[in-house]
Amino acid sequence: MSIFDGKRLTNETFKLDIERMRRGWYTDKYFVNIATMLTVLSKQGYRYQGRDHRLPAGIDPYQIACGDIEVEMQWFTRRPGKTIVVGVDKALTMLRHCTGYFEGDTFINTADQLEVWAVHDGCTVTSDGNPLHVQPVMRVRGRYRDFAILETPTLGILTRASRVATNVYNALVAARGKPMLFFPARFDLHEVQAADGYAYQIAVQRYNLDHASTLGPFVSTDAQGDWWGGAGGGTVAHAAIASFLGDTAEAMLAFAQVLPPSIPRIALVDFNNDCVRDSLQVCKAMFERYRTLVETGQPEEANRYKLYGVRLDTSGSLRDVSVPPLGDPALDLGVNPRLVFLVRQALDTAWESWDLPAEWREPARRFCQEVKIVVSGGFTPEKITRFEKLSVPVDIYAVGSALFDNHNDTVTDYTADVVRIKVDGQWIDMAKVGRKALDNPDLERVW
């Protein structure tokens, strides 16, 4: 599965569309074309006939069967800085099940004739952007036409999963150890959720390893947990509050009554664009129900009404009515530091205005002050860093589309290069200009 358990995932997890992948369904056509060309030339007994070869002196190029050429290929990314590598196990699974050729309608699998090295998911590589300084994450030696069509899908999973994992990792660093909810499912096709959730989980484990932390993963869909045994979690949506006529407190009471206590009660408090008022109303309503159940000897039922947190999700085009205007959109609109401070202060002191007997004042104080603040809506590592620098009292960040970011320093595109060919039993450098065979101490022989 990863560096964290030393195991590798198999097709039992990935459930590849093997038949169509073997046919080149997922492959850029130029790779299909070259595989077809080499196969035909092999059957024709073609030998090299050109004049402008790059072989060392003393090797006869005219005995080389280009159609059966064996190559060494390496996969790498040039993302600047540190990349959390994910997607290796799925790429290896593609090689294991789809390397080979067809004889009529029968597929001849030749994966066992490859030599394969790879790092584990969760490893890191670093780059300054120069392809001469990269660290390969996979190396394969074998007959090129047998695995040529796998370049596209192997690069695709490495690029996607490593980009998501690295973006998650950077957001966790920005949050300085605070939990981060994985909320990007709505921003892409549902088919990618399993890979994305796995990348997120690997990033959380990598962060824990690097920072001696104990963060747990939190994904929003069951599909995101498919590859590692996780399950989606969540609380209420704006639509739920609309279903209760805009009454956030009533919606939360109903939620607490119906859903199991294991689901944290986190109220979404921006529906009416007054996070302070709705936070106070929810907190008071939940506490009153909690207190009544405790006093009537129903402590387990009372636990249903313990308010775990409130989530602020104000649109970036709105100023919450509780935020005094300053005339600067960056300071007034959306979920901004002032709004979080106002909600925190209101929650911490809410109990002081409640009509309570003496023995309930301290439990009420704890109830209010233990309510966590979750923020969502347009959060990026840069915005999280700004909040942390200002010591904004956020307990949990929920991050969505920023985790798919792919521009400038977040571009994680992978490349695969042939860097050597095998001639007369020896491996000869044969990379395009500007590339060369490179090494990575984390590469291990897979088969």
Image (spheres, grey):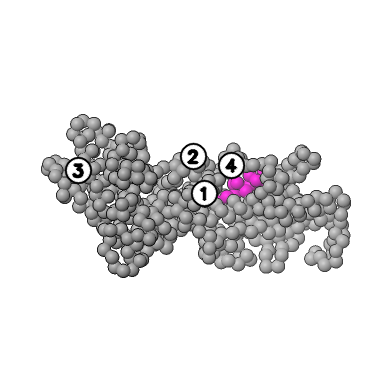
Return the residue at label 2: 229
Direction from residue 176 to residue 138 in the image, left or right: right
In the picture, the quarter occupied by the C terminus is top right
Residue 298, position as x, y percentages in the image:
23, 31
* Camera-nearest label, 2 or 1: 1
Direction from residue 430 to residue 308 in the image, left or right: left
Residue 404, position as x, y percentages in the image:
50, 56
Write down the quadrant of residue 247 in the picture: top left
Q: Magenta span has 261?
A: no
Q: Secondary structure at mark 3?
A: helix
Write down the quadrant of residue 125 in the picture: bottom right
Return the residue at label 3: 363
Q: Main secondary structure of the magenta part?
A: helix
Tell me if label 2 and label 1 are in contact, CB under 8 Å: no
Q: Given the image, on which type of amino acid does mark 2 rest?
A: Gly
The crowd level at tag 2 (other Cα within 10 Å; few <14, some 14-19, many 20+) is: few
Direction from residue 244 to residue 146 in the image, left or right: right
Return the residue at label 1: 196
The crowd level at tag 1 (other Cα within 10 Å; few <14, some 14-19, many 20+) is: many
Residue 308, position as x, y percentages in the image:
31, 45
Q: Who comes first in sequence, dot 1 or dot 3?
A: 1
Which span of residues is magenta-colored?
85-99
Direction from residue 145 to residue 225 in the image, left or right: left
Return the residue at label 4: 14
Specify the farthest residue to the front. Answer: 245
x 40%, y 62%: residue: 383
Q: Who comes first in sequence, dot 1 or dot 4?
A: 4
